[in-house]
Image (cartoon, coloured by chain):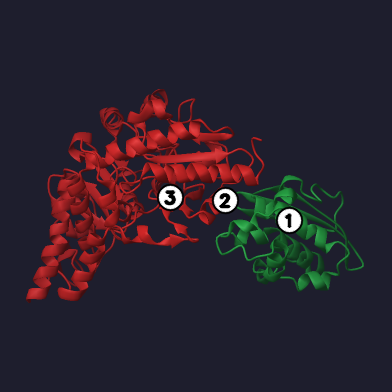
Chain colours: A red, B green
Amino acid sequence: MKRLDVESIRRDFPILNVKMRGHDLVYLDSAATSQKPVQVIDSIYQYYTNYNANIHRGIYELAELATDAYDGSKDKVAKFINANSMEEIVYVMNTTEAINLVALSWGEENIKEGDHILISEMEHHSNLVPWLLLANRKKAILDYIKLDESKTMIDMESLKEELEKDPKILAISHSSNVLGTINDVKAIGSLAHKHGAKVLVDGAQSAPHMPVDVRDIDCDFFAFSGHKMLGPTGIGTLYAKKDILNSMPPVIGGGDMIRTVEKYACTWNDLPWKFEAGTSNIEGGIGLSAAVDYLNKVGMGNIYAHERDITEYALKRLSEISNVSVFGPDYNSMPNRSGVISFAIEGVHPHDIASIFDSMGIAIRAGHHCAMPLVTELINEAAVARMSFYLYNRKDEVDRAIDAIAEVKKIFKIGR
Amino acid sequence: MPIDIYAEELISNYEHPHNKGKINDPNAEMHEYNPICGDDITLYLKIKEDIVDDVKFDGKGCAISIGVASMLTDSIKGKRLEDIDAMGFKDIVKILGMDPGPARAKCASISLKALKKAIFLYQHKTVDRDTEKL
């Protein structure tokens, strides 16, 4: 592991120079979306300035350049998560669309009345609502793996119990966007496979922050978003094993996803294009490609170590403050912990916390974080505040957040 | 949002809200809930000859939603319904002493929304779609 040169990384992110409410910006909301380095911004500028053309069909140099850049981005993404080839990399809008694509294509083909679909209690709505919709359409049964007593980890006993129902698919987050828990998806997936279930891993919060090897995890599907990993919005990836993708029908029809079209029949294009109808998000693919280059240059292992260091520091500092509670594994459980920290200050609504942070130039998030069953039913709060870190964050930014908590307590006369 | 919004008056109205509770046998009542943040307010009115005789609210929420509900209910006692009908977001800005900004506008106006809907229901026996907007 190499220590990150955070100062030189920060110079690549123009937005870190802006002021927010008159203060130097402290951006602690990368779990919602990451900031973008100049290399990514510039790659999109270069595309539109120098070789904008539609891909795959043009018989001219610009079209070839655009096609190479777009298709080449898939090779990079495939390598980034150690997929076998770019045939297994389907571009979608984001993680949400990736999971919906699985539910609408694989799900429609394989889920029948009375079948079980298994997810966990810590899922984001993107890995919950598509399955709820599918279960309702098919009269199938949606089951939940319970959290353990600490409400921070998957309860392995509950997992084993639910697997006894032989679910057709297990869909689980790699890293929780609320608790910061990193699930051992390799071990969980291997148990699920023994019961014949397909395994989908929601990688929205893992792919940007740690090395991911889909072949080592041995998941059947892996979904993630470009905009959370330094790339632009509107581009995300569904990885799926080739034989599964081959067996899945397309969901959206149109140009580029077909090989031949007759009046009353058509044949599909090769993978992965079978699932990408119409003109692609070319700038998105090119931007994502630049993002992957950037992450590779810094090194995913180094990024993971850096975030773990900052998170451990933040958790320790938070543990020293009275009337503050943290939801998720504590600093003694760092191997299971990502750089997402949800917290509450007794007697203060999270939106008031976020507003006071905002007034001090610190961007955090407050709400149910699109994980309503987890937040409102299990953590039992209407909302929680959340800070999340990335490769450009420093410990002194954690200090600024700790100061802001002191300010919140002062305004609300707490702990005096 | 500037930190000044959390003035002493707002905080004290949040910590010790006025008119908190229920009115038995109200002429009008309305529940408003924002699932995004959990702000949850029910407003109860006692109306006599088109004048607010008494008002109370119950519920939970952030300092802005509860603080404004406390100050708003204080301000409408003895008011004519037609005057309340003419109220809008500008009156919330007046109560807070500043515009809370787009991110907190819903928190700030939840009690006024409940109030206007309750009165509309009382007068027209229906909740018109227009009252969804302030």
Up the image or down, A326 lies above or below A363; here it is: above
Please, which residue is most extreme toward the top here? A157
Q: Residue at x 11, y 74 (%)?
A: A62
Instruction: Tell me which corner region of the image, top left, top right, bottom left or bottom right, holds residue B79.
Output: bottom right
At a point 48% along the width and 50% down the height, the residue shown is: A365
Of discs 3 and 1, which sits in the foreground?
A: 1
Q: Relative to A281, is A238 above or below? A: above
Q: In this view, does A87 lie above or below B120?
A: above
In the image, farthest residue toward the right: B49
Chain under callout 3:
A
Residue type indicated by callout 2? His
- Between residue A196 and residue A76, name the one nearer to us: A76
Q: Which amino acid does label 1 sit on?
A: Ala
Host chain of mark 2:
A
* Residue hosting label 3: A133
Q: Do the residues labelled 1 and 2 touch (CB within 8 Å)?
A: no
Res. A351 mark = 2
For discs 3 and 2, the disc positioned in front in the rendered view? 2
Q: Which of A296 and A306 is in front in this view?
A: A306
Q: What element carries label 2?
A: helix
Q: In this view, does A160 lie to the left or right of B54?
A: left
Q: Mark 1 — on which chain does it sit? A: B
Q: Name the residue under label 1.
A: B69
Q: In which quarter of the image is residue A139?
A: top left
